[in-house]
Amino acid sequence: MQSKSSFDRLWMPFTSYQDCIDNPPRIIEYGSGIYVFDKEGRGYIDAIGSWWVNIFGHNNPEITDAVKKQLDKIEHVIMAGFISEPSLELSGLLGSILPKNLSRIFYSDDGSTSVEVALKIALQYHALKNSPRSEFVALGGAYHGDTLGAMSVGMVPQYHSLFHERFKKQHFTDSPYCYRCPAGKNCSSCNAECMDSLQKILEEHGEKIAACIFEPMVQGAGGMRIYPEKVLKRIFSLCKQYDILTIDDEVAMGFGRTGKMFACEHAGKTPDIMCLAKGLTAGYLPLAATVVNEKIFKEFQGDYKSNRTFFHGHSFTGNPLASAAACASMKLLTNNNIPQSLNNIIETFSKGLSNFNKFDIVGDVRSIGMVGAIELVKDRKNKEKIPADLRFAHKVTQRAHKYGLLIRPLGDIIYFMPPYIITEEQIENMFFLTEKALKETIDENISDLR
Ligand SMILES: Cc1ncc(COP(=O)(O)O)c(C=O)c1O
């Protein structure tokens, strides 16, 4: 048994103190495939891939083996003047799946640092060109990580408002939130009007803007807001029109998650800078990459006197163990022909999800690739929100945990991002358990929902 004092010392991420007391974290001892198991041997379907990182299941034999083999060689070595073999191999493997123009890879540790690197590269790129561009434009509803730079381009009020008041806030467009379209359109009438706001910002401030950063196709932490490719195309075309660098944050959606290797492929466009993390190591170890095209890299070429060095790095940059995991993950992607081979499972996933439409409390069901979400509302007809104090989605997910399903809410949204290796039967079970938890939570809160 874990002693009480161990819990007393913990400060859990994204969790209030009281919630931690009311629902102490379950201690997970091992994992296998889509399951994680607690100390009592109780299994939980990891329906959100442990915060979207796990794409090939827990304790995947190939990745585990690659890390073990590397551990017998070297755990870590500085990446400046020296480099480990797996880090070098990884750049080749990544190069073989990246869009052709993205040719230079800079490693860091996690999604947030990959974004910090992207923002810094964009700023230094303009400085090197003697351009005054030093501001960023981002999308309303965006989430790019929790470090200060990444937060400055984030717009999820619950996470960011406090900090925006205290440091530089950037420019924000409307959110491409189709269920609550800011332009009052629907799927058939949409012409990417939400990005009129981007056009306006670029018209007014374009000369000052260093880059436009966006999550392609899905705004994840903002509430799994899935938007159409025409919106992404418009972002790219407006940036081209106003000569603005594009930073495509594929931290959550890269490596096949949306049904394409990289989500920017839905628009048939390649960004100037791309951020990668999460699925890079298939959830084994922290590692990230910021990838840029030669136009950008060219500005950083020069000797030590030229001031063209990019002064950025982390102690664990290019960590060999993480790189070995990433190499194995990249090989699994290509050897298993991902994303094409996911087509059948994606169909089962989206069909199973659409079944939630039968509940009056479900206002919207949306999915793309292996990302699915249901948005809960008090009144389906007018999309009235459930009173926040009821913490309805939170209650559903707490109940689901009891039934062996690991899900987390995003406000009133319950979402699923399981590992790609999930089977049809496991998908059915995942939705069966969700439905059970949802029904029981509705029954228990029926008077407050009226
Ligand atoms: C789009 C996006 N960018 C950046 C991040 C930050 O990644 P990390 O949590 O690894 O710092 C996230 C995390 O969810 C994300 O979804």
Image (cartoon, rainbow, N blue to C red):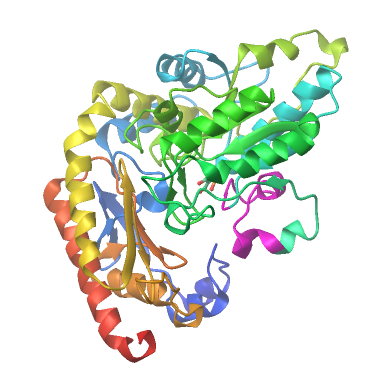
Q: Is residue 42 visible?
A: no
> At 31% from the left edge and 87% from the top edge, which residue is drawn?
446
Residue name at image x 54 percent, y 64 percent: 14
Residue furthest out toward the front: 189
Q: Nearer the viewer, residue 356 or 418?
A: 356
Q: Please, is residue 364 above or below residue 320 in the view?
A: below
Residue at figure coordinates x 64%, y 40% from the top left: 198
Res. 102 visible in picture: yes
The answer to whether 378 is drawn above or below residue 87 in the figure is below
Residue 36 falls in which quadrant of the image? bottom left
Quarter of the image for the N terminus: give it. bottom left
* Picture coordinates of residue 21, whole percent (x, y): 49, 80
The part of the chain drawn in magenta is 141-161
Q: Is residue 39 left or right of residue 76?
A: left
Q: Nearer the viewer, residue 317 or 162?
A: 162
Q: Quadrant of the C terminus?
A: bottom left
Image side of residue 448 versus residue 291, left or right: left
> Is 414 left, or right, of 177 in this rendering?
left
